[in-house]
Image: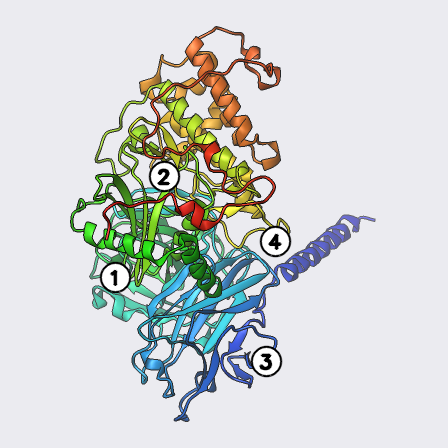
Amino acid sequence: MENLPYHKNLIRLFLLLQCSSLLLLSSAYTLPDKYFINCGSDSDYTVNGRTFIGDNNPNFSHGRSKSVKDTHTSANTSPLYQTARIYEQPSSYELKMDSNGTYVVRLHFHAFPSSPNLSTALFNVSTANFTLLSNFGVRNISKSPFIKEFLLTINGTQFSINFTPSPDTSLAFINAIEVFLAPESFIPTNVSHVTPSGSNSTYSGFLPQLLQIVHRINVGGTELTREQDTLLRNWIADDDFLLIRDAANSSFKGIVNYQDGGPTQYTAPDLVYETAKVLNTNFSNITWRFNVSKKARHLVRVHFSDIVSISLNVLKFNLSIYGKFSWPINPYDIDMFKLAVPFKYDFVVDSDDSGFMNISVVPWNDSLKTPFLNGVEIMELMKESDWVPPMQSEQNKTHLYVIVGSVAIICILLAVVVIGLKRWKAKPTETLDCKSREGSGFGKVYEGTLRNGRKVAVKRSEPGHGQGLPEFQREIEVLSKIRHRNLVSLIGYCDEGSEMILVYEFMEKGTLRYHLYGDPKGSSSRSELSWEQRLEICIDSATGLHYLHTGVVGGIIHRDVKTTNILLDENYVAKVADFGLSKSGYLDQTQGTTGVKGSFGYLDPEYFNCFQLTEKSDVYSFGVVLLEVLCARPALDNALPREQMNLAEWGLSWQKKGQLEKIIDPFLVGKIDPNSLRKFGQTAEKCLKDHGIDRPTMDEVLYDLKYVLLLQQTAVHREPYEDSASDLPLEIPLPVVQRLPSHSVPVEEEEVPILSHDGSSTTASEVFSQLRIPDAR
């Protein structure tokens, strides 16, 4: 009996080991067997243990294409690069997906001798949401095969790879495709965000949809081929990236001690963790310089394994980025009892305008001159392009010409644009951010003047940009169906050659954002809108959105409601603009959407997480706009402390404490009736509910905002409970908003119901018969 506790401990240990083994087995990752595709071939070919399946069979849907074979096969050329699938018109490669998650996507290109000549090909490669390659071509036949690699978030049952030949060559091709699920948690969610100036903040919720591999470096070792890597990756030796080669010595060790919860052989192969560069004691640091895109965002992953020390707890050093940001590296924070334990760090790094990124390891102090590095990966975060599948694009393009009703109008608009561009102001009045990203979007907006003296806004795509076609088409589709005093009107468009131009009514006062907190770049101060003006602007915007949701059969979901897409005319009448991301209200809720579109800070969490898009997604975004109007600050500001970065979260926290007045725009302090503010806060809070079913409709939001304005105008002092929406009498008198009319669009909502409630509609020519451009040629 005295041995019983001992036996119990053995049993507990045995059970613990069994559970640990089961846990390890359940979480184990093995390289999937699909998709590995031998394009343009009817034969399978095994490479590095993976069988590439010939795609000349009915199991693959590769669109309008044909196969081509190498006419001068060389014994040195892998069979994988002796066939190709070519595209002479826009088309798509369709793959059925079994699971959602982060996928490795590799595209193989080799321009072997053939007819047509693959070395002359020039083309774009896209997914439903991103441009993977723009104006890509393989000019040198003797060059080794090009492999372009991406990490892509795929949520849905189908994945399309779209090939669009350049008009100059009318040729695109692909030799092989790899699309397979990456290990779980391969991409981090919480990352340190580093700027070129050295500032550091937490980048929370980091789940990018597309990363392009820029560099994958085996520090201290030789080049690693696909055969030597667990995920079939290539690693390049680091010597050519060293600023001073003599500053580093190579180090090698044969055994790596992988630990639970840390990197695995799929994070990086053994051969990366078994080699390193170590600082030469005659130098103060080792610095590697990598070429990167200018002013872009990158995920930087650095790999470490202490194969240098001969005993524990003797080594600490710093990792430096751009020589300004420093991060302490202590291998013994990872494991106190073993050497050669792999660990890694991930950083989101903004590049500067030099085109280079410097990464260094620096001693902790003068007495410890043995910092080291085992590996580096740099991946660029690609920006969303909202690409439309080629076949649909071609159909829509024909349809758009029918909408205009006459080639003459296209020619007129082209003449106006081409002649007028010389007379228009050289600088853009503002760049409209058409998508959830910094940069050009569809294009820049210019102020123009027609020959009759009427001012117009002209949004012109950037030549050679390779993006914007779906936005261009969607904008015309939507604005040809709707007409409302609180929606910006389209006057016409031009689609000729590489020119894509949209002509709108001119909005004299610009964006709401500008009037709330000035130019986004901080070069201009804001104007000072009164509380009543802000409420009237919110009411106008809500009216326009309500019409979008209900005024057309099936409704239209804007999908990018934000303060830069609310424009003001000369009388501060607000109009919702930019319908390039909008969707018909008829959505198949069983399929969700192919990708989340919109702007970070405004995205409905239910849409972002579950891909269920409804009109309540616009309501959530509008709730963020309401807080932006009240607080006069951006929806997202990474320069602020963590708890203040996200306006929706920050505003709701103060609203729930009943202290919303503490974060309002200083200009409004003492100018808002407390009851008006209380009701406004309640309205914003309802809009920002986590679940769409709990949010009000835009009609209900509109009603509440009119009541908020009434409370401000009458300044009646009520008890707090009297402002509850549930206690409001239906017959409450709502204020009549008196303002000068907008002269930009003399058409009232009731005058042009493009689609009636019984489903009948006016013709496209009837819509555009109202458009006249005097004296244009």
What residue type is disc 1 on? Arg
Marks 3/1: CA–CA distance: 46 Å
Identify the residue under disc 3.
Answer: 57
- CB of mark 2 within 8 Å of CB of mark 1? no
- CB of mark 1 within 8 Å of CB of mark 4? no
Q: Which residue occupies the extreme right position in the image?
A: 1
Which mark lies nearer to you, 1 or 4? Answer: 4
Identify the residue under disc 4.
Answer: 591
Marks 2/1: CA–CA distance: 27 Å
Label 2 residue SS: loop
Label 4 residue SS: loop
Q: N-terminal of the two: label 4 or label 3?
A: 3
Marks 3/2: CA–CA distance: 50 Å
What residue type is disc 3 on? Asn
Label 3 residue SS: loop
Q: Residue 210 — which label?
A: none
564 up-or-down from 83: above or below? above
Q: Quadrant of residue 407?
A: bottom left
- Could you say which is closer to the camera, residue 419 or residue 651? 419
- CB of mark 3 within 8 Å of CB of mark 1? no
Residue 526 pos. (x, y %) = 26, 28
Label 1 residue SS: strand
Identify the residue under disc 2.
Answer: 638
Q: Residue 289 — which label?
A: 1
The residue located at (50%, 53%) in the rendering is 595
